[in-house]
Amino acid sequence: MAGKLGSSFDQAEAAQTSLRSALDRSHRGEWRAWAEFAELHDQACREGDQILSWQATAGLMLTGQHFRRFERFEEGLAELEPVRVDAAGLDATQELLVLNAFLLALMLCRPLDPSIDACAARLQLLIEQQLDVNLTLAAGRTLTFYFEPRNLREPALRVHALIGPRMAEPEATPYRKARWLHMWRICAHYGRQPHLAMEALEQMSALARQHSMRDVEYLAVLIEAQNALPHGDIPTARAAIERAEALVDSTQLGELVLLELEKTRLAFMRREVASALHHASRARWLSDEVRMPAAMRWPYAVNEAFAQLLGEDYEGGRASLQALAGSTPAGYAQEVDAMLQGIDAYLAVCDGLPDANRRIEALWAGLRRRRSYDFFDHLPEFCARLCVLALDRGIETDFVRSFISKCELAAPDSAPPSWPWPLRIQAFGGFAVWRNDELLAAEGKAQRKPLALLQALVALGAFNEGSAVDVAHLVELLWPDLDAASPKASFEMTLSRLRKWLGVEQALRLSNGRLSLNSRLVWCDADAFERTCVALQQTLRPHADAAALPTLLQQMNELYRGRLFGNAVLEPWLVQARERHVLRFTRLVRDAGKHLETMQNWSEALSLYEASLEQDLMAESLHLALIRCLLALGREGEARRALQRCEDVLGIDLNSASGTELRELATRLSPLR
């Protein structure tokens, strides 16, 4: 009898030793732990040791999740069912392990299960009990995964406060710390806390380098790609993906899933529809191969939908998103619903449906109520279009502007003046710069050259990379008298001072020896004026649809508030730029006015000339057109006064006026004067 008891004791002790060994390997991020847990589970089942079986199953699930191997999740969830309502005979440390795995499996496999909230509350109580540090780090990670999609930021911060001090405990393994930081970074990122997210990434990367954790370094490199893409930094994203390809373990299909996901997002940013569809489909196939639970597959389905939207297959994208109904966690389900609303609203506008405005209002009101900023994250151009639809109609303007700023959306060409550019430059009628709606002071000798450089970029039309100006040309214009060695140093110092004064990272782009403003971050009235002029020219072409003419004329007059840089004394080459804009403005007003006169819309033509003269009183052709309209309307008295104003303002002797039309008008009106 004693021998049997001793043998049983030895077996139990050996099993506990095996469990500790498997847990230790799992805490160090070794894939071998998965096989040890599987062997231990089989042994526990043979011996009828339920507690050990549960712990081994929990180890399988937690280890498998890190390596994206999910084949034991469904059966593990069924086996751990007894812990749904209570500890089921487990001590606190055992419950911490088993309940963590059960909650994780519920969220991944049964995202709408009503027990999830109660299990999360129990797990949160357990991590407050100073139990095993590595199990606590793993549980904190799961709880953060629970809080994030539900927008429960305050509970997540409380968990962060509990975990923080325990990171310094010597028993805490680098791998568990890194995996906790990885999840915390995700939470901080979606909570729009970029400094916290960057801090977590830096700590995670440092741990990976210090302890040679290839898989953690791989995750950190992929995050670098994720961070670069929303800013349009394609070279950095592409370089990060190339580094990830060198780090990936191709035998781990779960790692390949993540790589394909980032390749899909890069294809989105590069507007490569075929590539986006290819990588999105491959990522989804790999997610099936690793038997990823339905609740985890939704991002891959969303990416396929995004690829369809990128190719302007809006109906196909909508159908792909609609297929996710009922298979996503509550918080993410709201995000998918919002995306469906966004597609419907966009299509309603495109199709001219009468309820288009109502759909846009419902979309943005819902996002505002939920304070939701997770909306078409990897399709920023489409998201920006939806923002423009709201701003154009004055719908939820404050929230939409906040949304644009927090999501750092690039302004599309159709962006209205209400778009919240980080930097705004006024060049017509003076020169001023606003950063986040605050006027920047431009005083002192030290600012003269930086401001001259900025004015040069504006005058030369360098508003984006496509119109960037060669640095050598800028040096020639701004430092014509310096010797050959000095201009480059002078330019570099001036550029550095200008960047510091503007205070917006990436507002200036220097690439391949050419400098420009970044139109994604900087709005300038001269740039908007030029784009409006192009649209006006197209509208005034023969047989063109002139329906947009009144709106475009109003925009042009609102933008052109006087001559380039106002009354400032300018260098000759800047005077040329000023005169070029004057001619552009007066010719377009003249052409648009003639169009209106041809249509005998004399009142509209008169309003155009009056508004345009307010912007440029020195334009003789506009004075003449104004007088001509007044005469056509039979308003001779006003025409006489307008002629006298022309004489006074321009300093012209009407009796000897050189212009044929002006002399004819003076002769015609002279009996009435």
Image (tube, helix red, strand yellow):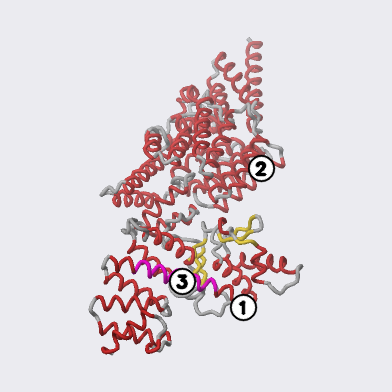
Q: Which mark is residue 302?
A: none
Residue named by callout 1: 444
Q: Amino acid at mark 3?
A: Leu
Query: Does residue 590 sit above or below 312 in this rendering?
Result: below
Q: Amino acid at mark 1?
A: Gly
**Mark 3 or 2 closer to N-term?**
2
Residue at 57% x, 30% y: name it: 254
Q: Is residue 374 left or right of residue 548?
A: right
Q: Position of residue 25 (x, y in %)?
A: 66, 29
- Quadrant location, the N terminus: top right
**Residue 579 falls inside the magenta stretch:** yes
Q: Position of residue 10 (x, y in %)?
A: 66, 17
Q: Which mark is residue 583?
A: 3
Q: Amino acid at mark 2?
A: Glu
* Neighbour tally class for label 1: few under 14, some 14-19, many 20 plus, Cα within 10 Å: few
Element carrying mark 1: loop
Element carrying mark 3: helix
Per the rendered image, the range of residues in magenta is 576-593
Residue at 36% x, 85% y: name it: 645
**Residue 513 falls inside the magenta stretch:** no
Residue 71 seen by the camera: yes
Q: Is residue 230 left or right of residue 608?
A: right
* Neighbour tally class for label 3: few under 14, some 14-19, many 20 plus, Cα within 10 Å: few
Q: State the separation of the CA atoms marked 2 and 1.
A: 54 Å
Q: State the separation of the CA atoms marked 1 and 3.
A: 33 Å
Viewer-side label of 3, 2: 3
Q: Name the magenta segment's main secondary structure.
A: helix
In front of the other: 143 or 640: 640
Element carrying mark 2: loop
Q: Which mark is residue 169?
A: 2
In front of the other: 614 or 18: 614
